[in-house]
Image: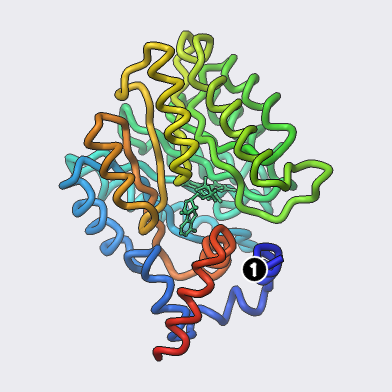
Amino acid sequence: MIRRALLDVSENRWLRKHATSSRVLRRSVRRFLPGETLEEALAACSDLGKFDLSTILINVGENVADRDEAAAVTKHYLDALNRIGSYRLSIEISVKLTQIGLDLDPDFCLTNLITLLAHTRAHETTWIDMEQSSYTERTLCLFNRARQDCRNVGVCVQAYLRRTEKDVEALIATGAAVRLVKGAYNEPTEIAFSRKREVDESYFRLAKKLLGKEARRNGVRTALATHDRNLINRLTAWAGSEGMTPKELEFQMLYGIQRALQLQLAEKGYGSRVLISYGNFWFPWFMRRLAERPANVLFLARNLFSW
Ligand code: FDA
C-alpha cells in the first residue's frame, strides 16, 4: 500500500513542480543524488573510479512537454558527452525518451537520440531508460530504429512486465545491449507480476536467457541492474556453473544503495557500474526510490523530525 501511495504521489503534477524546494526533501534526497549539477555528478564519477567502479550519468527528468525544453535537454547531454570525453574513466549516459521529446513527436525524439549516439565514445553505450508500460512499445520501436544507424545504444527492460520474455527474445536475436531491471512503476496485474517472488523469478529467468549461449553468440551486452543480494548470488553461482568468468558479468546499481556490495563485486572482477542521477527535477524519481524500500520512508521521517 505504501509503495502504491508513493508511486501515485510521484505522478502528482503540482508536487513534481514544487516539492523540490522543501528543505527536508532536499536534505533526504542527497543520500541518492550527489548533487544537482553535472560538475557534482562528474566529481562523484571520479571518486567511484578510484575504486574501479564505472559509472552512468542521468540528468533526472521526464515527460517534457515543450520542444525547446527537449532540445535543451539534448544539448545538455551533448555537453555532458563532450565533458566525459576528457575523462580516462568509463562514463556512459542514460536518457529517458520522454525527456528528449517522445511525448511530442517520435521522429524529433529519434533525431535527438541519434545526435547523442553520434557523440558517444567508441566502446561505450548510451542507455535508454524504460518508463511506464504505456511507453514500452514506443521505446523499443525507437530503440530499434536508432540501432539501424548506431550500434552503441542500449535499452532497459523490466522483469515485472509479462511481455518482457518476448521482448528479450527479440533483443537477443539482434545482439542488442540490454539492461535488466525489476521495474519501478505502478502497473496493473493484467500486464505485470505483482508479487515479489514472481518478479524475482522472472528476473532470474530473463537474466539466464540474456547471459545464455545464444545471447553470447550474438554479442549481447547484458547489464544486470539490481541491488538484490540473493538474486546476485544465484546469478553468479549459475554463471560460474556455465563456465563464465566474473569479467563476463556486469552489475549496475544506483548511487547511494548497496555501496559495499558494489565494491565487493568490483574486487571479485565483476563489471560493476553505478548509475548517478543529478539535476533538479528529482521529485518523481525520489518518490520511486522511496517506494522501492519502505525503510526509506522512515529515513525521510527521521530527517523531518531532526530538522
Ligand atoms: P529489490 O527492490 O528487491 O531490492 C533488493 C534490496 O536492495 C533491498 O532489500 C534493499 O536492501 C536494496 N534496495 C533496493 N532499492 C532500494 C532503495 N531505493 N533504497 C535503499 N535500498 C534499496 N526501473 C525502471 O522501471 N526503469 C529503468 O529504466 C530503471 N533503471 C534502473 C537502472 C539501474 C542501474 C538500477 C539499479 C535500477 C533501475 N531501475 C529502473 C529501478 C528498478 O526497476 C528497481 O525499482 C530497483 O532497482 C529496486 O529493485 P532491486 O532489483 O534492487 O530489488
Q: Residue at x 54, y 70 (%)?
A: 283
Name above or below for residue 303 compared with residue 272: below
Instruction: Determine the secondary structure under disc 1.
Output: helix
The residue carrying mark 1 is: 6
Task: Decide which of 198, 207 is in the foreground and name it.
Answer: 198
Spot occupied by residue 167 in the image (x, y as percentages of width and height): 67, 27
**Quarter occupied by the N terminus:** bottom right
Q: Is residue 132 something that shows in the picture?
A: yes
Give the image quarter of residue 29: bottom left
- Estimate how packed mark 1 is, as few (under 14), some (14 to 19) or many (20 or more) residues with alpha carbons within 10 Å: many
Amino acid at circle 1? Leu
Give the image quarter of residue 75: bottom left
**Quarter occupied by the C terminus:** bottom left
Residue 189 lies left or right of residue 71; in this view the side is: right
Spot occupied by residue 74 in the image (x, y as percentages of width and height): 46, 52
Name above or below for residue 278 compared with residue 275: below
Q: Residue at x 43, y 86 (%)?
A: 23
Q: How many marks?
A: 1
Give the image quarter of residue 229: top left
Name above or below for residue 236 compared with residue 283: above
Spot occupied by residue 202 in the image (x, y as percentages of width and height): 64, 33
Residue 82 lies left or right of residue 3; in this view the side is: left
Q: Is residue 138 something that shows in the picture?
A: no
Q: Residue at x 42, y 24 (%)?
A: 237
Name above or below for residue 122 compared with residue 272: above
Residue 45 lies left or right of residue 227; in this view the side is: left
Spot occupied by residue 154 in the image (x, y as percentages of width and height): 49, 33
Beta carbon of the mark 1 residue lies under 8 A of ligand 1: no
How did the renderer colour the structure? Answer: rainbow
